[in-house]
Image (tube, grey):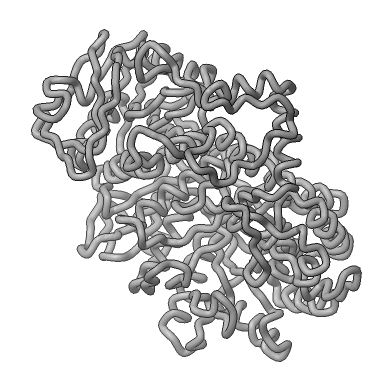
Amino acid sequence: MNSSLAGQPRPIIELDSGMAFGCDYNPEQWDPAVWAQDATAMQQAGVNFVAINIFGWSHLEPREGEYDFSNLDAIIELLHEHGIRINLATATASPPPWLTTTYPQVLPVVEDGTKRYPGGRQAFCPSSPIYRHHAALLVEKVAQRYGNHPAVALWHVSNEIGCHNAHCYCETSSIAFRAWLMERYESIENLNAAWGTDFWSQRVSDWSEIFTPRLTLSSRNPGQSMDFRRFSSDALLENYRLEADIIRRHSDVPVTTNFMVTAHIRNMDYFSWTADMDIIANDHYLDHRLGEPTTELSFAADLTRGLAKNDPWILMEHSTGSVNWQPHNPAKTPGEMMRNSLAHVARGADGVCFFQWRASLQGSEKFHSALMPHAGEDSELWRDVVALGKTVASLAEVVGTRVESTVAFIFSWESWWAVDAETRPSESVSYLEQAHAIYAAIHALGTTVTMVAPGSDLSGYDLVIVPTLYMVSDDHAGVINDYVGNGGHAVITFYSGIVDEEDRVRTGGYPGAFREMLGIRTEEFSPLLPDQVLELSDGRTSSLWTERTTLQGATAVSSYVDGPMPGGPAVTCHEFGQGRAWYIGTALDQDGLLNVVRTALESAGVKPVAAEADASLEMVRRSAANASFLFVINHGQQDRSLSTAGYEIITETTVSQSLIVPAGSVRVIREEILP
C-alpha cells in the first residue's frame, strides 16, 4: 500500500518561483528609509514570500473608527515591485490600547478569577462580542482594500490563535459556555448524565448554575473541565471563521492561520479546525527543555502533515537561531538551521518561513533571532541565511510531492487533555511524553508515520500505532478493532481505551474498548513510584506503570521479574481475526521499546526508508507519480555513507551507487525511477 503518492504535483500557493522562502516582516518597527534596503536584501537572500500586518491594528486604526492605510499601502507596493508575494494578515492578533481602555470588559480572566491587562499581546476574551465586532470592522476594511491585489498570495487570519488567551473564565465566557452546552446536550438532564453530577452533590437544575471551571478548593468536575476545553477550542475557531468569511467575500486567495503544533501548546483540537483552512500552516520552535528536540521537530512536522491529510503544508514560522522565551536560549550550531528547515521540507512542507525578517531593537522579542540579525549582513548567520535561500530555491521540483508512509499514528488532543487532567492514577504519566517515546522508537528505526485523528480510515495502512488513547468513543475504538480484525497490525500502549468521550470508565476490566481485541484483561492499575525500575524477563527494564493483567488469548512477549506484579505480562501479542495486536502495558526502556516496535514493523511488512536510516541519519521520501526525492539529514558527528542512485540536488552531483553525507549536512537525491 502507498497512501501518499499523488498525480501531477501542484503548488499550494501561487508563487513566481517554486518553494516559499520567507518571514514575518514588521516594517512599523523601522523608519521608512530602511524599507527599501530591506526589500533589496530580501531579494539577495532569495525571500519570495513575506507575512505583513500581523500586529498592525494600532497603526491601521490608531483611534476607534479612524483608519490609516498609507504605510501598509506603501509596503505592499514596495514588496510587489521587488517581486515578493505577500502573506497578508488581518492585524487582529493583538487589540490596540484604545479598545481595552474604552471597553475593559474585553479583557480576559484567568482560572483564579483575576483579570489580565494590556501590555503584552492577545489581551482579550475570545468570546467577547465587543472584540469580535471591532475585529470584524477592521477585517472588512483590509479585505475590501487588498482583496484583489496581485501581490497577495495568502490571507493570514490573526496570528497564533489561542497562544496566550485560549481559556478565559470571565462572565462573558460563562454565558457563551452555557450556550455551547445547550447546543451540545439539549437538556439539563443530558448534561447531568454526561458530567456525572450525582457525585459530590454537583447536580444542576438550571443552565444559569453553570460557570466556567475556575479554581476550586478541591479537584474540579472532569466532565465540566473537558467540555470547557472543547468549548474554548471552538470559540477560538469561531473567531477564525468570522474573519475568514469576511475575507472570502472580497478575495479568491487562500485563507489560513498559523497553528502551533509543538510540545508546549495543547489548547486547540486542530483536527476539528482543518476543514476551515485552505492551507495548513504551522509555527515550530526547538524546545531545549525536551530531551531530544530534533525528534520532537520531526514529530511536530508529521503531525502538521497529518492535519493536512498528507497534502503539502507551510512552515510559517521557525527560528534562525535562539529564541527568547525559554529559561535558556542556546544559539543554533553550524548547519543546524539548514537541518531544521529541510527536516520540515522532508516531511511535507512546501514553504520555509521565519520569525522574523529583521531582529527587533525594542520590545519583548528583541533577543529573538531573525533572518537579518543585529550584527547585520557582515555576519555568519546572514551568510547562512543566503545559503539556505539558495538551497530552498533549488528544491522547486519537490513542490507538490507527497511524503511516503504506510504507518498510521493516532494522535488525540482530547486524550492529551484528559490524561494530563486532575485526579489521575499517576501524575508522572504524560500523554505527550508517551506519544513522543514510541514515536522516537519508530523514528530511530527509519520509518515515517502519518498522523491521523481517532476515527480515521485505517484501511490503507500496514501498521497502526495507538499511544495512550485514554479517551475514545465506542465508534472510534471500533475502527481500530475492525482494522485489526480485518488483517491489520497495531501497537497499543498502556492507559488506552479506558473511558468514553464523556470520561466515563468502561467497566468489566481494562483496557476497556480494546480488551477483546488485545486478548487481555486488567483488573487494576499499579503505577510505580518515580524512582522504581523493574526487571523484565527479556532482560529489559520498565518504569512508571504496571497493571494486574491476565491473558485471555494473548501471548506474553515479556513479563515482570519483580515489582508489584511478578510473573505478570508486561508486553503481549494477540492474533485477533486476521490481524495482530501488541499491547505495551508499561513504560519500557529505550531498547525494550525499540525491540517491540521493530518486531511489529517487521511482522506488518513495513520496511525502513533505507537500510542505513537510524536516529542520527534521518531519511524521508517525497514522491509523485513520476518523481521520487530522498531527503537525508545527518544529525550525527560522523560522515555517513548510503547506497543510492540518482542526482543530488544540493551539491548538483550525479550519484551512481553510493553517497557520502558529511556530518551535520543534508542531501536531497532525485532518485532514478525504474520503468
In the picture, measured across the screen, residue 407 lies left or right of residue 208, that is: left
In the picture, measured across the screen, residue 142 lies left or right of residue 614, that is: right
- Total labels drawn: 0
Q: Where residue 356 sits: x, y (%)?
A: 57, 72
Q: Quadrant of the C terminus?
A: top left
- Residue 621 placement: quadrant: top left
Residue in front for this viewpoint, 22 or 399: 22
> Does residue 355 appear in the picture of this structure?
yes
Q: Residue at point 32% right, 39% down?
A: 438
Q: Where residue 8 sits: x, y (%)?
A: 60, 42
Residue in front for this viewpoint, 512 or 461: 512
Q: Quadrant of the N terminus?
A: top left
Q: Residue at point 59% right, 40% down?
A: 229
Q: Where residue 528 sits: x, y (%)?
A: 23, 35
Q: Where residue 50 sits: x, y (%)?
A: 65, 68
- Residue 341 placement: quadrant: bottom left
Residue in front for this viewpoint, 225 or 599: 225
> Does residue 350 appear in the picture of this structure?
no
In the picture, measured across the screen, residue 627 lies left or right of residue 568, that is: right
- Residue 666 placement: quadrant: bottom left
Against 10, residue 315 (above or below) is: below
In the picture, measured across the screen, residue 281 lies left or right of residue 100, that is: left
Q: Residue at point 67% right, 39% down?
A: 211
Q: Residue at point 80% right, 79% down?
A: 71
Against 229, residue 508 (above or below) is: above
